[in-house]
Image: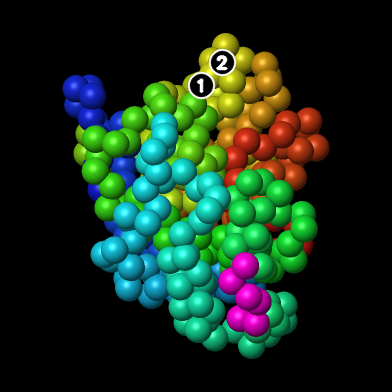
């Protein structure tokens, strides 16, 4: 993922990495296409999401200026995704729907359906999604709504003053917007070599958390690492036996091409394995909602 160093506390490395709005979604689309080309049962799904990521990048590029001020909030995180949502996300949604050329069901029907919804209904849908209550939504609708929200919050996060980003103000959540992580990565290169960063599911900001520490409860004594047998994808589940939660960890040191969203989507078998073992996932990928 393309990122910009944001803030440091004298440790010699940035505790927070802001997204590079000019390329974050195009990098994701490239990785999704690479994964889709491997001809697994997930290939059509990943190829479709690559199209969505391309559309996200196209729209994000039009929001280079003017997006930050309507979203800024007073509180522990500067981009808190709470109601009322700024109208600029509706502009992004319309642009995203226009940019997508997907005639096939169910996404084609979803594009048409969302395009006919009044702004008030779309705002209600988005608030439900952001508040963690997506069950009232059609899952394909939820995926495209989330894609539009990601565009706006990512563009805004890229423009934040780094001084405003403090991981200590938002335990378990993104220091920019407060959202849950989608996964975590072990970075390669530079002064972040080997460090673990959590990746925001909404705004693509990354923030440092020491390795061998539970993302949910903070414990470090009973941490285990699991992967699908015979898999060398570089993706493991970091699981805590104190709280029985897990978060995926992607090793970019050994596999430089890994991307937080794309490779999470491509490793659903690991989620199934962890659920069968009695662990609950901490984190969110909006494109993995049931039925999407």
Give left or right: position of 12 versus 258: left
Q: Which is more N-terminal, label 1 or label 2? A: 1
Q: Is residue 35 above or below residue 281?
A: below
Q: Residue sitting at 29 percent across and 63 percent down?
A: 66
Looking at the image, which residue sits at the far top?
221
Q: Is residue 176 above or below residue 147?
A: above
Q: Is residue 218 above or below residue 17?
A: above
The tag on residue 213 is: 1
Residue range highlighted in magenta: 114-120
Could you say where residue 184 lies in the image, as x and y percent from the top left?
A: 48, 39
- Whether pointer 2 and pointer 1 mark residues with C-beta atoms closer than 8 Å, the reply is yes
115 is within the stretch colored magenta: yes
70 is within the stretch colored magenta: no
Q: Which of the image's four quarters has the C terminus? A: bottom right
Nearer-the-camera pick, 188 or 213: 213
Could you say where residue 199 lies in the image, as x and y percent from the top left?
A: 45, 43
Give left or right: position of 274 versus 178: right
Q: Is residue 81 above or below residue 192?
A: below
Q: Is residue 14 visible?
A: yes
Nearer-the-camera pick, 251 or 114: 114
Numbered disc 2: secondary structure: loop
- Count neighbours of disc 1 (C-alpha within 10 A) and say few if under 14, some if 14 to 19, many if 20 or more: some
- Count neighbours of disc 2 (C-alpha within 10 A) and say few if under 14, some if 14 to 19, many if 20 or more: some
Q: Image quarter for residue 112? A: bottom right
Nearer-the-camera pick, 54 or 137: 137
Q: Residue sitting at 64 percent across and 88 percent down?
A: 103
Numbered disc 1: secondary structure: loop
Q: CA–CA distance between discs 2 and 1?
A: 6 Å
Q: Is residue 206 visible?
A: no
Number of marks present in the image shown: 2
Could you say where residue 80 lies in the image, as x and y percent from the top left?
A: 46, 43
- Please give the residue where the numbered disc 2 appears in the rendered image: 219
């Amino acid at each position: 993922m393309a990122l910009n160093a944001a803030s440091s506390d004298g440790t010699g490395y940035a505790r927070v990495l802001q997204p590079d709005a000019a390329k974050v979604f195009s990098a994701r689309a490239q990785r999704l296409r690479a994964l889709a080309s491997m001809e697994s049962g997930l290939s059509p799904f990943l190829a479709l999401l690559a199209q969505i990521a391309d559309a996200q990048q196209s729209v994000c590029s039009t929001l280079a200026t003017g997006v930050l001020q309507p979203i800024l909030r007073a509180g522990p995180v500067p981009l808190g995704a709470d109601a009322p949502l700024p109208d600029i996300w509706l502009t992004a949604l319309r642009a995203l729907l226009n940019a997508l050329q997907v005639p096939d069901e169910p996404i084609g029907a979803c594009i048409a359906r969302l395009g006919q919804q009044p702004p008030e209904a779309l705002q209600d849908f988005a608030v439900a999604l952001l508040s963690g209550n997506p069950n009232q939504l059609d899952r394909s609708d939820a995926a495209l709504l989330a894609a539009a929200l990601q565009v706006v919050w990512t563009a805004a996060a890229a423009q934040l003053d780094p001084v405003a980003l403090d991981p200590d103000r938002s335990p378990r959540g993104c220091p920019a917007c407060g959202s849950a992580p989608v996964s975590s990565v072990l970075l390669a290169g530079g002064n972040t070599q080997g460090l673990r960063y959590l990746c925001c599911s909404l705004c693509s900001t990354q923030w440092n958390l020491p390795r061998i520490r539970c993302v949910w409860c903070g414990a470090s004594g009973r941490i285990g690492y699991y992967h699908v047998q015979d898999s060398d994808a570089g993706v493991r589940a970091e699981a805590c036996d104190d709280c029985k939660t897990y978060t995926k960890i992607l090793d970019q040191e050994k596999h430089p091409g890994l991307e937080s969203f794309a490779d999470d989507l491509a490793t659903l078998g690991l989620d199934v394995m962890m659920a069968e073992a009695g662990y609950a996932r901490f984190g969110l990928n909006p494109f993995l909602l049931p039925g999407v």
